[in-house]
Amino acid sequence: MANHLVSESSPYLQQHADNPVNWHPWCEQALALAREQDKPILLSVGYSTCHWCHVMAHESFEDQTTADLINRDYIAIKVDREERPDLDQIYQSAHNLLTGKSGGWPLTLFLTPDQTPFYGGTYFPPEARYNRPGFKDLLPKVAQAYRERRHDIAQQNISLRESLASGGPVPQAGIEPNPAPLAGAQSQLEKNFDPVHGGFGGAPKFPRPSEIAFCLRRYAAEENAQALEMARQTLRKIADGGINDQLGGGFCRYSVDERWLIPHFEKMLYDNGPLLELYANAWCCSGDERFRRVAEETVAWLEREMRAPQGGFYSALDADSEHVEGKFYVWTPQEVAATLSADEYAVLSRHYGLDQPANFEGSHWHFYVAHPLDQVARELSVELDDAWRLLESARTKLIALRAQRVRPGRDEKILTSWNALMIKGLAHAGRTFGREDWIALAQQATDFIHAELWRNNRLLASWKDGKSNLGGYLDDYAFLLDALVELLQARFRTADLTFACELAEALLVRFEDCDQGGFYFTAHDHETLIFRPKTGFDNATPSGNAVAAFALQRLGHLLGETRYLAAAERALKLFYPQIASQPAGFMSFLSVLEEYLDPPQIAVLRGPAEQVAAWQQTLAKEYRPSTMVLALSDEMEKLPGSLDKPATSVVNAWVCQSVKCLPAISDIDILLQVCKVGKIG
């Protein structure tokens, strides 16, 4: 026996390829070995930038004594949750049923050879501490229980599988969706809102983009001032906190405190795409230039640290460097003062809190906006423009100095679903701010996915080192379809529309439950696992079912394709009882509900290219989440019937909503008023 991870492409699995544990990837060979040897499976699920995964690896999986216990009694399987979200979703749900606790990573489960878990947890220390059993004590005890308590385990496994199978949505005839969940979600968010620090709930605090997006949509739909204030306050506090890298841009995954000050330092692609879109929308709603700067800094980080030469985006940056969490990011005042001029230090130290007590492990400082720059300028008796100049020169010096440190590890696999979230964010922010270069980044990433991860009308989930692998999941198809619909509004390309239609067809054929509605997380020809999830609630990323329904609904209205609209409606109605009872858990589905009740406006602009672009930019500066604008110049050909409007010497706009259409509009002010009203007839 030997470690079988050496040839795996996953950076996480590669991190464990030198362990003395006889690891296998999840594969039929490993599962067959468990059955043949009648051994339980030790399943360890994590990801390459996970701090506590590193801790458990160093303490246990690199330890020969622990490895000997594992190798003697178990078939050990290591899973990258980012490459295999199907397995992660199943076994996180199972962990919750077994322990009554929320899961996380590392996820550590003990399975019978038929893949059913019978015991588990998350992180286990090598010896008992933190009110957790020691891993070295636990391993022989679980193996003994497997040998001696087969009947009890078998009965528990039956119950667990039944619970997993019964946890999905149940169709209910005769229920028609109505607006009540929108008000219910708003009320719940108001109760949970932190008026001092922003966000919803206490520590640890996650950005939760879908909740902030819901608030902005409520503001647009109802002019709800409270909804806008919750979104603005939250985005301001996140922007000013340590969860936002004040020097280099980009957002960390969450804050360990309620004030957004000290993050868990890993940066994930899937957070930054939706947050980029949110800051663009918040700028539209408020005109706050701070939000524009945050968007610019986020894209600068993306280009500098996350973009692959081929055009796609890498997955994540580690929290640790040199085995220490946050070491790359934190400072001492002495380091900073030695690098900056006296004037630069005076501004930066006051602005970023170096004049306050150390905030990271008692001896280091992590930057956050301690005092607004205009206040700092007044206190130092300098002009605000001069304060900005000094701050920017100081930041440039510190970024250069930080670049000389040992960098956190970067997970360089390119995931289709996470790239799609970033493509949408770039396309939307690029359209909002008139940044053609951002739109170009979105298009290049789209072209990379189309070239490298689209094979025979099937998406693949992951790419690394020139190799694409793993059949795509629902999130891959749904998120990419949604991104393409957004990209069409930023810069229309017929190739993107064709790709969107191909994706929509594949999504229906490969994932839809035609009997009950909704979409399974895995394709119909995916390997058989102990459970096939079909869920509608949001997690760290939006619900695949909700995004699929939202994108199909929009594409259906855009093209007049009733099959797409019907599939979206079936999904909404399947999940609607759950949405109605727990609206705050289904934020992404609430956007589907909103546009089901009031279909989006579609404005098609046609005319000379420069004039069309000017109209499009004027419209993009106002926040209209339920208006889709497609800018088509006269040169475009082979358009579908719904978009093939007559070309003229001036710009004309054709505005439709559901089956109602207005006559052509040739005055931009009239068009702005029509779009502001939001309804036709």
Image (cartoon, grey):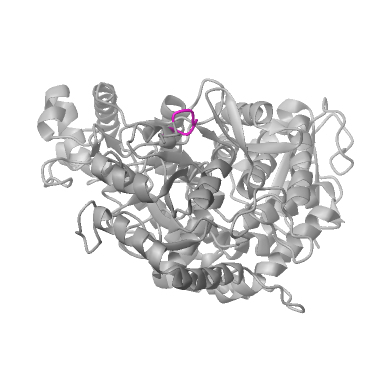
For residue 385, side relative to residue 349 (left or right): right
| Residue 268 locus on image (x, y percent) | 43, 41
Front residue of 120/475: it is 120
For residue 551, side relative to residue 82 (left or right): right
Front residue of 149/289: it is 149
Residue 7 within the magenta-colored segment of the rendering: yes
Residue in the picture at 71% in, 69% down: 573
**Quarter holding residue 29:** top right
> Exactly how many numbered labels are in the figure?
0
Residue in the picture at 84% in, 51% down: 561
**Quarter holding residue 368:** top left
Q: Quadrant of the C terminus?
A: bottom right
Front residue of 99/204: it is 99
Front residue of 116/56: it is 116
Residue 184 within the magenta-colored segment of the rendering: no
Is 192 located above or below residue 624 in the figure? below
For residue 92, side relative to residue 137 (left or right): right
Q: Quadrant of the N terminus?
A: top left
Residue 643 visible in the displayed image? yes
- Range drawn in magenta: 6-11
Residue in the picture at 53% in, 44% down: 277
Residue 381 visible in the displayed image? no
Q: Main secondary structure of the magenta part?
A: loop
Residue in the picture at 52% in, 66% down: 585
| Residue 538 locus on image (x, y percent) | 53, 59
| Residue 335 locus on image (x, y percent) | 13, 28
Q: Residue furthest bottom?
A: 174
